[in-house]
Image: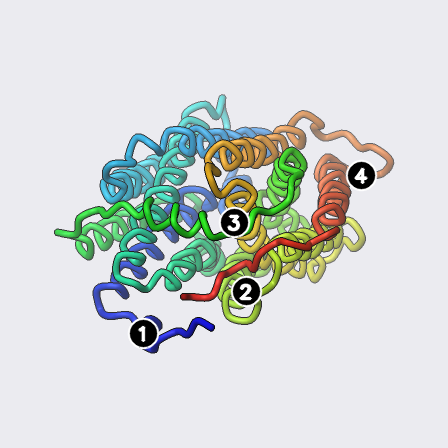
Amino acid sequence: MSTVRPAAILPDRASGLVVVSGLVALAVAMGIGRFAFTPLMPLMIRDGTLTTAVGAEWAAANYGGYFIGALTASWFSRDPRRGVLLSLLGVALATLAVTWVDGGASGLPGAALRAAAGVFSAWSLVCASSWCLAELARRRVPQLGAWIYTGVGLGIALTGMLAWLGGRQPADRLWLELGLIAGAGALFVWWRTRGQRTRVAAPAEREAAAFAPRARGGQPALVLCYGAFGFGYIVPATFLPAMARELAPDPLVFGLTWPLFGMAAALSVAAVARWLPNAPRRRVWAFAQGVMALGTALPLAAQALWAVATSAVLVGGTFMVATMAGLQLAREARPDNPTPLLARMTAAFAAGQIAGPVLVRSLGDGRWAGWDALGLVGALATALLVVTAAWLWRDPQHVPPLVRQAE
C-alpha cells in the first residue's frame, strides 16, 4: 500500500508561489476576462449604455473568443509562462478599453473587445495550467495543482463583490477599476515568476496514463453531455444578475447573486478535493450536473429573489466540479492520446455556451406558453441537464477515482 510522506504534502515557499501565481492568473483571466460582464451587464442597462439584445451579442462574442483561444493556445507550448503573461496583459487592456465603449449603437466595438478578452482568457487558462502543473510535478507536490482552480471562483466572487458594493457607481467606472485590478494581477504574476523556467511535464503524464485503467466507451455521448453542460450553465451564468435586477432594482440586492456564484464555485472545488477523493468521475460529474439542473429550474418555478440566489449557489457550486470531472474522465477514456477527445469536448462546450445567449437573443421579447425568452431557454437547459446527468449516472464500474491518491 502506498503512503504519502509529510514532505510530499507540505509545500516549500517556491511551490507556494507557483500555486499563488496560478491562482491569481486564473482569477484575473476568468473572474474578469471571461465573467466580469455578467454582473456589469444589468448596471450598463441601468445606465442606458447597453441594451439587452446587444448584451447577449457581447456575451456570445466572449464565448466565441474563448473557443478560438482554446484552439490557438498551443502556440505557447514551448513557453507557457510567456503565454500567461501576454494573456493577462491582454485581459487588462481589453477590460480597460470597455470603459470608453458605448453599447447603445451597433455594439460592434464592445463585442470585439469581449471576444478579445475571451481569447486571452482561454490562453491564460491553458498556459497557467500547463506551467503551474508542470512546475508542481517537478517539485514533487502535484497534489497542490487542484488549488489553482479555486482562483476561478475567487475571481468571480471578487468581481461580483466589486459590482455589488460599487453598484451605485456608473458601470464604466467599474470597468476601469476591474481593468486596473487585472493589470495589478498581471504585474504580480510577472514579479513572482521572474527567473523561473518552464519545465515540460509530458513524460510524467504519459507514465501516469500508462498505469491508469481505461474507462469504457461512449465517447460521442461524453461530448454531447459536455456540450449540454456548457449550454445549461451559461444561461444562469450570463443572466442571473439580470433576473435578480427585475425582482429587486437596488444594486445592493440584485448584485449579491454573482458573489454567491463565485464563492460557491471556489468552495466546491476545495470540498471535492478534500472529501471526495475516491468518488468515480462519472458519478461526480452526474451529481454536479443534476444539482445544476435544479439550479436552472428554480427561477422557472418561483419568480422570487430567494430562488435566484439559490440558483446562483447551486449552479456556481457545480460548474467547476463538472468541468474538472468531465475533463478527467476524457483523459481516462483515452489515456494514450486524449487530445482529440478533449478537443471535441471543448468544441461542444463552447458551442453550448454560444448557443445559450444567441438563442435568447433570437427569441427576442415574445412569449411562448407564458414564458419569455430566458424562461424558455432555461427550461430547455434544465431538460438537457437532467437527461445527460441520468446517462452519466448509469454504470460507473471501472471508472477510476476523481483524484488519484499520491503515490
What secondary structure is marked by label 4? loop
Identify which residue, 277 or 210, lies in the foreground: 210
Whether the residues at callouts 4 and 3 have beta carbons within 8 Å, the answer is: no
**Type of amino acid under label 4:** Trp
Which color mode does the image show?
rainbow
What secondary structure is marked by label 1? loop
Q: Which residue is mark 2?
A: 272
First in sequence: mark 1 vs mark 2: 1
Quick check: 17 above or below 201?
below
What secondary structure is marked by label 2? helix
Q: Position of residue 39 (x, y in %)?
A: 51, 49
Q: Position of residue 77 (x, y in %)?
A: 29, 36
Residue ranking furthest to the bottom: 6
Q: CA distance from mark 3 to mark 1?
A: 25 Å
Q: Which mark is residue 10?
A: 1
The mark lying in front, picked from 1 and 4, is 1
Q: Position of residue 29 (x, y in %)?
A: 38, 46
What secondary structure is marked by label 3? helix
Q: Which mark is residue 371?
A: 4
- Mark 4, Cα crowd under 10 Å, few <14 / some 14-19 / many 20+, is some
**Type of amino acid under label 2:** Val
First in sequence: mark 2 vs mark 4: 2
Q: CA distance from mark 2 to mark 4?
A: 36 Å
| Residue appearing at x 74%, y 46% in the figure | 391
| Residue appearing at x 42%, y 29% in the figure | 71
**Type of amino acid under label 1:** Leu
Identify which residue, 396 or 221, lies in the foreground: 396
